[in-house]
Image: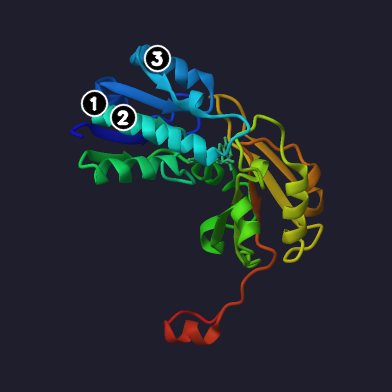
Amino acid sequence: MNGSLWVAGAGIQMVSHVTLQTRGLIRHAQKLLFLVSEPGTAAWLRRLQPGAESLDAFFLPGRSRQESYERMLDHIASRLRDGCRLGVLLYGHPAVFSYLGPEAVRRARAAGCEAEMLPGISAEDCLFADLGAALDFDLSTAGYQCFEATLFLLQHRRPDPLCALILWQIGIVGQYQYELAGPNRAGLQLLAAELLRYYPAGHQVICYEAANFPACPPSIQPMPLHRLPAAKITRLTTLLIPPAAAPPRDGEMAKKLGLPEA
Ligand SMILES: C[S@@+](CC[C@H](N)C(=O)[O-])C[C@H]1O[C@@H](n2cnc3c(N)ncnc32)[C@H](O)[C@@H]1O
């Protein structure tokens, strides 16, 4: 294998989130593969690189997403075996809640190819930008945890109600196949029931969806936690749960650090 690979992020918003560095790479790639969340970026990529190929065709309805990703990885490996200078563009950040991006780079390097990853704007970056100034707490000083929703349930992860919680992929909770159907309501019921062990039923949570298109507003749906199972949710929804209480401040530690006690 003597091909080379870069994997980059396309960001969330059509074309405008692609960095200048990534645009340069797209122009010079010998072959471009992509997986993006809206058709505008796909059309733009095909104009820049007429041979650009979407990886969407590798998704198999009714089969596991893992199986589809393995098919994509095989396709990438076979291109590299042909000695191709290959670029792969993935929506968001290519290593944020993405199996494909890091695994493609890992396998290419293991096969002796040069491979690098370039960052992109993730859904979480958009959430910070869209909600940061609207919340009555500061996400970074409150601290936050984040989990993939299905793993949160399967692994019985414990949220810390003194910080914020971000749950990814709530629209496909408990769904391992690639499906284009609506959200899994039974899975959402289980998710809400688990969260209700840690937060009051009336605790306000936010279902968030960053805008995919410039000049469109994001979707921001605040609601009490107990309404979550009935919420309008898509595959692209991310859940933000604000802290349920302010953390205490340790006066003794403040003293040791030479900081005011209050
Ligand atoms: C497989 S992950 C991919 C994340 C992507 N790599 C990134 O950097 O944002 C898919 C999940 O990302 C989140 N996501 C993707 N697009 C989003 C959007 N437009 N607004 C909010 N969350 C989004 C949702 O939680 C969705 O289920």
* Residue at screen point 26% across, 23% down: 29
> Position of 261 compared to 7: left or right?
right
- Seen from the viewer's position, the closer of residues 195 and 70 is 70
Q: Which element type, helix, strand or loop, lies under badge 1?
A: loop
Please tell me in which quadrant of the rendered image residue 171 appears. Answer: top right
Q: Residues within 10 Å of mark 2 (few under 14, many from 20)?
A: some
Eyeballing the image, is 135 above or below 17?
below
Q: Residues within 10 Å of mark 1 (few under 14, many from 20)?
A: few
Which residue does the numbered mark 2 point to in the structure image? 78
Give how far apart the Cα atoms at labels 1 and 3 are. Answer: 22 Å
Q: Is residue 217 visible?
A: yes
Give how far apart the Cα atoms at labels 2 and 1 are. Answer: 6 Å
Instruction: Give the label on residue 82, or none.
Output: 1
> Position of 61 compared to 84: left or right?
right
Q: Quadrant of ligand 1?
A: top right
**Position of residue 243 measured from the top left corner of the image (x, y, whole percent):** 65, 62
- In the rendered image, the quadrant that contains the N terminus is top left
- In the rendered image, the quadrant that contains the C terminus is bottom right
Please tell me in which quadrant of the rendered image residue 64 appears. Answer: top right
Q: Which element type, helix, strand or loop, lies under badge 2?
A: helix
The amino acid type of the residue labelled 2 equals: Ser
Q: Looking at the image, is mark 2 or mark 3 earlier in the sequence?
A: 3
Q: Is mark 1 within 8 Å of ligand 1?
A: no
Q: Is residue 166 visible?
A: no
Q: Which element type, helix, strand or loop, lies under badge 3?
A: helix
Circles 2, 1 touching at the beta carbon (< 8 Å): yes
Which residue does the numbered mark 3 point to in the structure image? 46
The amino acid type of the residue labelled 1 equals: Asp
The amino acid type of the residue labelled 3 equals: Arg
**Position of residue 8 measured from the top left corner of the image (x, y, whole percent):** 36, 35
